[in-house]
Amino acid sequence: MTDIENPILDVQGLEKHFGGITAIDGLDMRVGDGITGLIGPNGAGKTTFFNCVTGALTPDAGRVAFEGTDITGKRPSSVAQEGLVRTFQIPRELPEMTVRENLQLAPTEQSGEQLVNTWLRGDSFTDDELRVREQATEMAEFLEIDHVLDVKAGTLSGGQRKLLELARVLLTEPDMILLDEPLAGVNPTLEKKILSRLHDLESQGYSFLFIEHDIDVIMETCDRVIVMHQGQVLTTGDPDEVKRDDRVIEAYLGEEV
Ligand SMILES: Nc1ncnc2c1ncn2[C@@H]1O[C@H](COP(=O)(O)OP(=O)(O)OP(=O)(O)O)[C@@H](O)[C@H]1O
Ligand SMILES: [Mg+2]
């Protein structure tokens, strides 16, 4: 088993309870750079962990440090400003707005600034607005959704919505991105495209913590895997080690992993 000496994300003693349910139970986790997989059976607490770390939920106990800064209990906009963002298990685009409008909203939205809907106003653009527009176009090209820039987001396919969700978080210029099942409901062609983009982004210096149920994808994609079970980290290691670990197999109730 390996450990991370200089974690980017360092979580200690995290707890989250919902009434009588303990979703996160004194969890310690250290995440380094590259692509780290986060796996665990349904209900293990993976999404709740993301919510607690990025400020969507306030943890009941524990400490979350990102790049050496204590971000425990900070609002999502403050956490995003520190460089930590997440995508949602169910994408959260604005369906009545076009893909372009959704992308141009992204930076202001995550940084908590007021929305400045100048592109809707139709007036002349400031330099800042032109820059935001250009970045949105470049990001759409990179993720190959530029052909749907003027389409309402609500009409996109499931896979395209996942790409839009990824584009939106990338536009906030984060250091680390928490991905909550970015491949769920995505067809195999698009899945390959998303994974290939993740590798491109990794080589550009982005880090990912990647929740995914398909163990083969995790094996191919991740340098390191963290297994959660019942609100705690069960084990951490390279994909091969984790796959052979009896406790991991037991946690999945005998499912082949
Ligand atoms: N808002 C909530 N209110 C009450 N219980 C919750 C809430 N959110 C999560 N839980 C409970 O907390 C536990 C962890 O749920 P969570 O969604 O974090 O699991 P998960 O690992 O993301 O599962 P999955 O793989 O199915 O997405 C579960 O028992 C769940 O029912
Ligand atoms: Mg989940």
Image (cartoon, grey):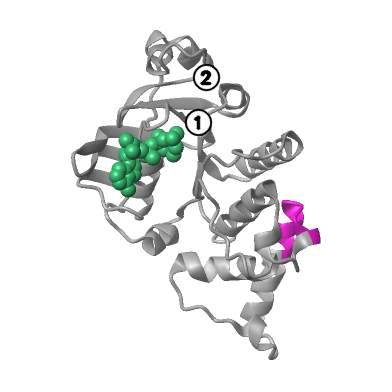
Q: Is residue 169 above or below residue 227?
A: below
Query: Is there any visible trace of residue 21 in the rendered image?
Result: yes
Q: Position of residue 9 (x, y in %)?
A: 38, 42
Q: Nearer the viewer, residue 77 or 228?
A: 228
The answer to whether residue 46 shows anywhere in this view is no
Q: Residue at x 41, y 20 (%)?
A: 2
Looking at the image, do the residues carrying marks 2 and 1 touch, with CB atoms under 8 Å apart?
yes
Depth order, front residue of 155/48: 155
Look at label 1 and name its amino acid. Gly
From the top left corner, tell me how far across and down residue 234 is, in percent.
Answer: 34, 22
Q: Residue furthest right?
A: 147
Determine if the C-beta at disc 1 is less than 8 A from ligand 1.
no
Q: CA distance from mark 2 to mark 1?
A: 9 Å
Q: Quadrant of the N terminus?
A: top left
Q: Position of residue 154 (x, y in %)?
A: 65, 61
Q: Is residue 92 left or right of residue 82?
A: right
Q: Secondary structure at mark 2?
A: helix
Residue under pointer 2 = 239
Q: Earlier in the sequence, mark 2 or mark 1?
A: 1
Q: Which residues are magenta?
A: 137-147
Indicate whether 60 appears above or below 133.
above
In the image, farthest residue toward the bottom: 123
Q: Which residue is mark 1?
A: 37
Closer to us: 147 or 204? 147
Q: Is residue 67 above or below residue 122?
A: above
Q: Position of residue 175 (x, y in %)?
A: 50, 50
The residue at the point 76 percent across, 37 percent down is 189
Report which quarter residue 113 is drawn in.
Answer: bottom left
Q: Residue at x 57, y 61 (%)?
A: 93
- What amino acid does circle 2 point to? Pro
Judged from the image, the quadrant occupied by ligand 2 is: top left
Label number found at residue 77 = none
